[in-house]
Amino acid sequence: MEKTAEYIKEHTNCFEPEIGIILGSGLGELADEYCSYALSYSDIPNFSKSTVKGHKGRLVFAQINGKKVVMMQGRNHFYEGHSMKDITFPVKVLKALGVKTLILTNAAGAVNESFRPADLMIITDHINFMGSNPLIGENDDTMGERFPDMSEVYKKHLINMAQECSEKIGADIQKGVYWANSGPSYETPAEISMIRKLGADAVGMSTVPEAIVANYCGMDVLGISCITNSASSSSGEKLSHEEVIVNANIAKTKFKNLILEILKNL
């Protein structure tokens, strides 16, 4: 981690970000627009290259609304074959670079039947159904406690602030619980019925490992899902990653404006 952080500092003129943003599928335009420095994951020591369409695989540094920001333009996923430690390693690097607040974004399927594609959802809590935990293994006491409290992973003051920001820009926004599966297959109708009954509003294949580690490391976490599809189709229409990208593109202006307003208020 220290070697990776030192490499990044050397190649960004010692840029010291205070806010980190992990950009999900189809949401990378913000990084393209505001980029000051960019490093490819393939060039950064110990970073793994993302293989998912819609993820450029770059670490982007920018000044936005007076804030120093680092953005991960794409992430690694458990279903790609990466270990939980590899998936969450960048979060620890962001912490080492000085990031105090981490904004996690993703593309997610709607479980709540009132949600529609291109809606945005502020994550109020999560359910980890990925079958693993990124904190398994020997604990590093310099990073966090062995048994971290998880009662407020997504900070209430950030949730309230994001809600107020959405009202300022006139964007309707949902709030709800995010359920994480390992993927890469989409859920069956029976699984979605179960997930709905157990209290989740959206389902995806990322974010939760990063949120767990960020909370463990003492970061303030805000999570935002872009609802890109219905989680399981009962109409016979097939679900596809192409649909995810299309609906993320529809929502990208609303998403970008919300993030910009949030950055003003952090």
Image (spheres, grey):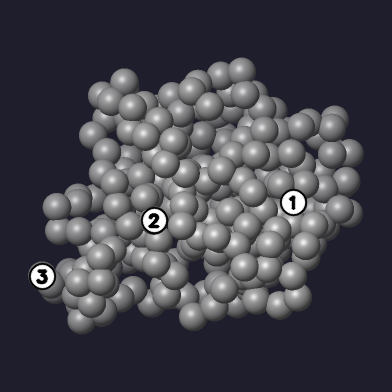
| Pointer 3 local density, CA inside 10 Å: few below 14, some 14–19, many at least 20 | few
| Amino acid type, callout 3 | Ser
Disc 3 versus disc 1: distance between alpha carbons?
44 Å
Residue 102: percent from the left, percent from the top?
Answer: 57, 43
Left of 226 or right of it: where is 15?
A: right
Residue 63, horizontal then vertical, whole percent: 64, 24
Q: Secondary structure at mark 3?
A: loop
Nearer the camera: disc 2 or disc 3: 2
Mark 1 lies on residue: 93
**Which of disc 1 and disc 3 is earlier in sequence?**
1
Query: Is 80 placed left or right of 7 in the picture?
Result: left
Choose the circle earlier in sequence order: 1 or 2: 1
Q: Disc 3 designates what residue?
A: 235
- Most foreground residue, 162 or 69: 162
Give how far across and how far down residue 15 sits, in percent: 78, 31
Q: Quadrant of residue 215?
A: bottom right
Question: Relative to residue 265, is residue 5 depicted above or below?
Answer: below
What amino acid is found at the position of numbered circle 2 in the picture?
A: Asp
Which quadrant holds the N terminus?
Answer: bottom right
The label on residue 36 is none
- The quadrant in which residue 261 appears is top left
**Which mark sits nearer the N-terminus, 2 or 3?**
2
The amino acid marked with disc number 1 is Val
Q: Please, what secondary structure does the residue beneath circle 1 have? A: helix
**Residue drawn 67% across the image and 53% down it:** 217
C-alpha separation, residue under disc 2 versus residue under disc 3: 29 Å
* Marking on residue 125: 2
